[in-house]
Structures are given as C-alpha cells and as structure tokens.
Amino acid sequence: MAPPPPSPPRSLTSVSLRTPLSPLLFLRPASCNPSAVSGSCSSGACRGVRCSAANKPSPSTAPGTEVSSTSMAKIRSEVLSPFRSVRMFFYLAFMASAGLGALIALTQLIPALSSPARAAAAGETLKGLGIDVAAVSVFAFLYWRESKAKDAQVAKLTREENLSRLRIRAGEGRPPVPLGELRGTARLVIVAGPAAFVTESFRRSKPFLKDLMERGVLVVPFSTDGNAPDLQFDEADEEEEEAAAAAGKMKRRLWQLTPVYTSEWAKWLDDQKKLANVSPDSPVYLSLRLDGRVRGSGVGYPPWQAFVAQLPPVKGMWSGLLDGMDGRVL
C-alpha cells in the first residue's frame, strides 16, 4: 500500500498575522528615581510632578503621530475668522485690477506727452493713473494689515496648541493626559513660580474654595525651583465633621493636577515670558477659558476673588448659556 501523499505546504497568505495596531495612549508613571528628576525626591515629597521623568519627551511630540501645532492653529484661525480669506482674495483682485488700469493709463500717457495733438487728453489720463495708483496702495495696505493680523493670530493659537499638549496627572497613580483633554470641562489656572510662591497661592485660595469649584476652576501648580510646594491640608479637614470633610475634599480636588515632563513646561513658560518681556525668575499665573484659550495672565498671585466675581457657574440653569462668558481673549 502506497504511503499517503504529503500535504501541500501552507501558503503565507493563508496564515493570519495579527499584530497590535492600536497606538500606545498613555505611558506608565516613571518610578521615583532621583537621577531622572530635577530637584530633590525626599520622602513625603516624592509624588506627582516630583516623580515624573522631567527630561523625557512627551509621546505627543513624536513626529508623524498627530497634526502639528501650527497646522492645527491655522485650522482654528480659519474657524475663528472665516471671512478673512475672502477679504484677502478680494484685496488681491482689486489690486490686480487697479494695477492693470494703471499700466493701461501709463501706456496712454507716454504718447500723449510726446505728441502735442494729444496733450489735451494727457490731464485726464494722468488723473486716471493717479486714481489707479492710489487704489493699489490702499488695497495693498489692507492686504498687509490682514496678513499681519492672521500671522499674529496663528502665532497665538500655536502657543495655545503647544500649551494644550503639555501633560498633567490628575492625582497620584493616574496616567498623564494632555492639558487639552480638559477643554470644555474646567477653567484651568496655572500657578508657576518657586515652591514658596505656590504654597502662598494655595493658602490664599482657601477662602474661595467652594465658589471656585462651582465655576469649574482647577489649579495646575508648577514649582520652578525644583522644590515641592507645601500643599498640606489642615488637620481639621480630617475630622469627622461633615463641613470639615467637604472642605478637605474641595481642596484636594482643586489642587489635584500636577505637571509631568517638566522640561516642556519650563520651555513653554520661558517662551511666554520672553514674549511678554517678563523676567525669567518672576512668578506668574495664567487663567484659561473653558475652550482652552488664555483669558488672563500676570505677575504675582492669582486674583482668586476676581475669578469668583467674573466667572459664571458651570452648573445649574446658567450652564451652557454663559459658557463663553469667560472674558476677552488675550
């Protein structure tokens, strides 16, 4: 009896090759390694931003992973100023029309000046030439002003896009997320300065905790000197009384955000200070609207009482109607 024929070799096309295609969304928090962190990492202060890899680049900045900040800023600029491109097109069209008229008038003016028989028509031709040259100048100025405003807006939106891609951690043990993930849900206040400045800003916010939480304010404390700010809560917050426990929860929720990849934060703040002609060592604050745009900034402590007076609540019957009433954009 003849042996059975050997089975034909399997084709490579019949083999199912399954590879994970979904991108890595979040990185695991870096371990508390003093060599990877700027500043001390002592016990009790080894959490949040102190334990993140300060010099490690954010995964969002890898080339080819997402739309660049400049491209996104141009898209947002078109949305915010939808008729700017139309105006600039008409300015160019009017410039071309007036320039063509000036060229025709110039070709008519040269023979008129050289021939005495046509000298009578030279005045009208010269008048038309002047009108065409003035029209070209006016529309060129309007186009230049519109182009300059567009460049300034794109530059501002690019800085805001770069800010939205900086990463924060909402509580210990949670993965870092981009700042832009909080758009539409929170009004962020960035407090950047030495640890003593951040601690004093924290102390000054205590009388307005409830009002700030009702307005969706969350604070991002960023210590620029490498030291951990003292954000300890009062012992009374740990008591069993309901009011004291609620106050303690509000403090923890209001100040729960911590920056990660601190080198990127420091670079962004340095660029902002240079543009504003502010000393690199000056402590500053920035307040953001619900849509993530900068609504206010300054040197010194954040005006918590002014925030309470200016910002509407984000819950209740006024929610949605007054979402855009965050103040003008800087």
Image (spheres, grey):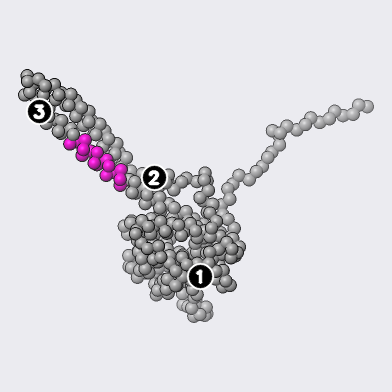
Q: Quadrant of the C terminus?
A: bottom left
| Earlier sequence position, callout 1 versus callout 3 | 3
Question: Would you say residue 315 is visible in this rendering?
Answer: no
Magenta-highlighted residues: 134-149
Residue at point 90%, 29% (across, down): 3
Residue 228: which numbered mark, if any? Answer: 1
The mark closer to the camera, 1 or 2, is 1
Residue 139 part of the magenta segment: yes
- Measure the alpha-carbon separation of dots 1 and 2: 38 Å
Crowdedness near tag 3: few (<14), some (14–19) or many (≥20) residues, C-alpha within 10 Å: few
Quarter residue 323 falls in = bottom left
Please name the predominant secondary structure of the magenta segment in the image: helix
The kind of residue tagged 2 is Lys
Residue 73 percent across, percent down from the top left = 40, 47
Q: The N terminus is located in which quarter?
A: top right
Q: Is residue 146 visible?
A: yes
Q: Position of residue 95 (x, y in %)?
A: 24, 34
Looking at the picture, how far across and down is residue 176, in whole percent? 53, 58
Q: For mark 2, what is the residue?
A: 74
Element at badge 2? helix
Mark 3, residue position: 124
Q: Quadrant of residue 314?
A: bottom left
